[in-house]
Every structure is written in structure tokens, then in C-alpha cells.
Amino acid sequence: MPSVSDPDSGDLAPSSSGEEERFTCDFCGKSVEQVRRVALDRGYDRLQKPHPVRYACPDCSTEKERERQQQDG
């Protein structure tokens, strides 16, 4: 499970050793401090169809959102 974050603050919770955890983006492979997964959005529902769960770094998430908006017209 990639993130141990407070959804309201966007801050990562420290790991048990007191250091921030690092995660790997499933799209570009970069090691980052935060990843995200958009599962529900207007016209976008990734909760109903079985599929591999993938998490994106902020750059990949922004690019995926841009592509999704272009597809919506």
C-alpha cells in the first residue's frame, strides 16, 4: 500500500523509524515521497472493473489528468 497520508492535509505520515517513506511510481518508475490514485471522477470509475491498482507520482498524475480531460472533450 503506497501511502500513509492524511487525506485532508496531503502530508505523509512518518514511518515507524521517523523517516518519510519513498514510493515508486507505477507509470514512470521514479522514487517519490507521494503517489496518488484517482479512482472516481466525473465519467471515470475505476472501482467497478477489476484491474491492477496503479499509483502515480505527481508528474504522472498531472499528465494522466490532462489526457483524461482531453478525452472528455
Image (cartoon, grey):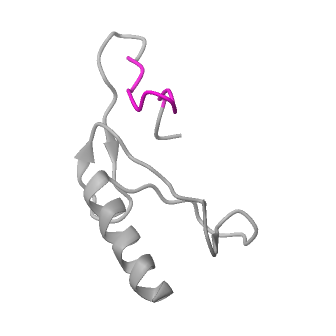
What residue appears at the point 50 percent right and 30 percent down from the top-left corner? Answer: 8
Residue at the image point whose x is 38% and y is 27% from the top: 11
Where does the magenta region start and end? 4-14
Query: 50 or 11, which lies in front?
Result: 11
On the rendered image, what quadrant is the C terminus found in? bottom left
Magenta portion: prevailing SS class: loop
Q: Residue furthest right?
A: 48
In the figure, residue 64 lies in which quadrant? Answer: bottom left
Residue 50 image point, x, y percent: 72, 69
Question: Where in the figure is residue 59, as x and y percent of width and height?
Answer: 25, 58
Residue 4 in picture, x, y percent from top left: 49, 29
Name the residue at the front extreme. Answer: 73
Residue at 38%, 46% in the rendered image: 35
Total marks shown come to: 0
Image vertical order of residue 41 relative to residue 67, above or below: above
Residue 15's place in the image compared with 34, above or below, is above
- Residue 47: name its quadrant: bottom right
Say which residue appears at 49% left-offset and 60% top-offset.
Answer: 54
Was residue 7 drawn as part of the magenta stretch in this picture?
yes
Q: Position of residue 19 (x, y in %)?
A: 29, 16
Camera-side residue: 23 or 38? 38
**Horizontally, is 13 left or right of 30 in the view?**
right
Judge from the rendering whether residue 53 lies leftward or rightward of residue 67; answer left or right: right
Would you say residue 59 sits in the magenta stretch? no
Foreground residue, 14 or 38?
38
